[in-house]
Image (cartoon, grey):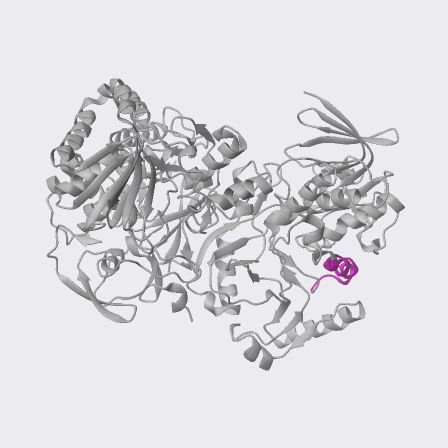
Amino acid sequence: MSERLEVDVAIVGGGLAGCSSALHLRRRDGAKPAVCLMEKGALGSQASGVNFGGVRQQGRDFAELPLAIRSRSIWSRLPELVGADCEFVASGHIKLARSEADVDELERYAEGAADRGLRLEMIGAGRIRDEYPWLGKNVRGASLAPEDGHANPRLVAPAFGRAARAAGADVREHTRVVEAARDGDRFTVRCAGGLEVSARFLVNAAGAWAGAIAAGFGERVPISTHAPNMLVTEPLPPLVTRSIGVCGGDVYLRQAARGNVVFGGGGEAWCDLALERSRPLTDLSARTIPKAIDIVPRLASALVIRSWSGIEGMMPDHLPVIGFSRTTPNLVHAFGFSGHGFQLGPVIGMIVDELIRDGASKSPLEPFDIGRFAAERRQLASADTNGG
Amino acid sequence: MVRLVDRDRPSIAFMLDGAAATAQEGDTILTAVLTARDRLAEANGIDGPRAGFCQMGACQECWVIADGRPVRACGTLLAAGMRVTTDRHAARG
Amino acid sequence: MAEPRIVVVGAGPAGIRAAEVLATHRLPLVLVDEAPKGGGQIYRRAPDAFRRPYAARYGFEADKAQALHDAIDRLAGRIDYRPSTLVWNVFDRHLDTVSDGRTGRIAFDVLVLATGAMDRVLPIPGWTLPGVYTLGGAQIALKSQGCAVGKRVVFAGTGPLLYLVAYQYAKAGASVAAVLDTSPAATKRRALAGLAASSGTLAKGLYYWAWLAARRIAVEEGVTDIGIVGDEAVRAVRYRRDATEKSIPCDAVGMGFGLKSETQLADLAGCEFSFDPPSRQWLPERNADGESSVPGVYVAGDGAGIGGADAAELWGERIGLAVAARCGRAPDAARIAAIDRGLASLARFRAAIDRAFPVPPPETWSDRDATILCRCESIRIGEAKAAVRDFALVEMNRLKAVTRIGMGRCQGRMCGLAAAELLARDTGQPLAAVGRLRGQPPVKPMPIPWTTEA
């Protein structure tokens, strides 16, 4: 059964980046572009839905801070924007120091962050004991980002997708893109099941699968996958008042509104990009659990009730690819968030809208330019290997 | 629960939520508690009052602390001197 | 070449017979079981301190129970038997286990999953009150703990187990206030023609029914609108029969609407599932050898489709023979053919049972908005329906993400089937279209930390 659509903007990928793009494009003042979003599974079912749920400015590479700061103001407006708060709580985020070296690292970061408009507050050992008596004895100090927090990742991308639909975007789930190619001065996107979309602009928000899309336009990038290892406990009495990370990043932890403690860390779980499957790894979980107990001792004897993983796109410098294609006009990339795209999702759509409308974004995008992989692209193209 | 048959098994003493209690050899923790009172645990803001449901380790409604360890009451035999705490979340720290 | 590492999970009728066949063929195996003593649920053994003879505990099934227990007792010394060991994950040709608080790992080349079944339950008003148990739970309380679940018990639901447990309770001296069967008498009569295929079982069922009637224990058929009444514990059961509303004082209820397969490990093992219309459940696919879509993974007994204990024993033996043949032992074609005939006959009987005791459709319970649907998370039917509307939900996992149904400790064992029925009905979809909840490790909650074996 074939169906042909002509739109202004075709978006490949229904994670948060794609859904956010669809929404912002349709919320534009004045003439609104016709948008079709194609997602191979259910909206937000990959990285956007399986991540830790941290809504975090602190700890980011400084290149990301302008985007994160801009995104943070959108998180406050979620109910107005998408009709739901998605359980976003500005609980504050504390990054813990478990050594004096960690404390130094936090202080250095806080200075740099302050220069870039993110105010962080150092918390010494005394305050830790007084204000966070539930933190473990190995915690020497922390850096607090009072405006950071967490949300429910299972809800956010679908909420953006729903709002995009309500704003007139054609959002197609279970619609797998099999080919996206230039067609004169337009793009033709062909899907399994017969849908064909012709568009003036193409947004590559395909997450871990975005490399294949980019390669189709002669723009191979060294994207790999990351499978997070996540666990969650049964509901527990309120205990963990902030979202928590640590220097070293080997464990992160938060308590959801219902009381469940979500935590993760520790390296690579298992995923298979071709099979589109992922699994948490027992050994990893077994190593991460004591770290979680070390920072929140009262977790001992809690019941872990499930664990999961997912497939996230990872770039070698852990920075996303955001911006125009270097090979193809009107192709916008927004992928490779390397396991920390959740907080950025709301602003990504705004940036994509700006790029398409104005040819440029208010946010500084140079560090995310796909051109930074030019050397790798030549290597990959000449290596005669498969994959992307 | 009501003892119906095989009722004259040897008596076992144990601690139930800090109070001395007795049950019988061969009782699971669930049986021991529910022959003494009509529920396993009170509503605690997280769960409603529960008294077990499936007796076979499927429903996950009978978790208690026994000698410091969380166990399913329906699948754990009571041991003499066992300290059983039914409100696991109050028991924590 | 070394023998393949064979692991059997579950020491109920299916697992014990599979292990027995494998041991007879001198194939090394590991038999893992969550319970301290083998037997499964229907032939569940009581702790040592209990003295009731088999005839009293198992009734007409005493000989079968004895034979099965003798089999596992004989096996225990000859094989690597791991009781009191829960398998909580399957991945990459190994099992993750926990026993006495210590985690472990068992590698396999061939896996036989014999994980059995549990009661199918439906959300009825008051079903979360203390004093309400599943039919299986009420039976276990009597069989292996010598207890009745209350001083005055009502049994409600449908299925052969309803009559069996009521009979066992009354025979043991418990006070049975009533047996309430949602299946009308006419439905059972129509299905009786098919039940002649296994007339011994039919005779037993009729015997239980007659025995209860002779003792003037109220047996009501075709009941509707069952509700359990009480503030903090069971006080009564109300129901409707024809146009009349009735109420029965009681302090405990045993409820169940047939059985459903426990399939979480098959799911984690990567088995393909398909929707089985007669049982209204997704089940792992298996071929005539009992092998799933994953080479080397076999699914035996009620864990892959409800067939009853006799069928489970046959499946266990059948799979044992298939695995033996896989390992190069001479196949026993005659025995395999006999087993297949037995399974076919039992399947015809099972189909008649399903027709005689149909699961009440969602319209019989889905308008009770205040009733809890998800017991673990205390999500009510009304909340689920509102979410389906407000979020245009059409699929089970999205329902789970939005409402938290199935996100609790039991991973949807209690509410998953009912939630699917509700979703399908409210969205006008066939039941198969709404999908299913997926198993996630650990399949049962595990306290932390996870201490490995020394």
Question: x, y (%) of residue A302?
Answer: 43, 61
Observer able to see residue A197:
yes
Question: x, y (%) of residue C302?
Answer: 33, 34
Q: Quarter of the image holding residue C340?
A: top left
Question: x, y (%) of residue B10?
Answer: 12, 60
Observer able to see residue C336:
no
The residue depicted at 13 percent of the width and 44 percent of the height is C172
Question: x, y (%) of residue C104?
Answer: 39, 53
Q: In which quadrant will I find the C terminus of chain C?
A: bottom left
Task: Decide: is C321 above or below C420.
Answer: above
The stretch of residues the image draws in magenta is A59-73
In the shown orientation, is residue C247 left or right of residue A277?
left
**Considering depth in this image, is C228 or A117 the residue closer to the camera?**
C228
In the shown orientation, is residue B30 left or right of residue A118?
left
Q: Is residue C32 magenta?
A: no
Q: In which quadrant will I find the N terminus of chain C?
A: top left
Task: Decide: is C306 above or below B50.
Answer: above
In the shown orientation, is residue A217 left or right of residue C400?
right
The residue depicted at 72 percent of the width and 48 percent of the height is A336
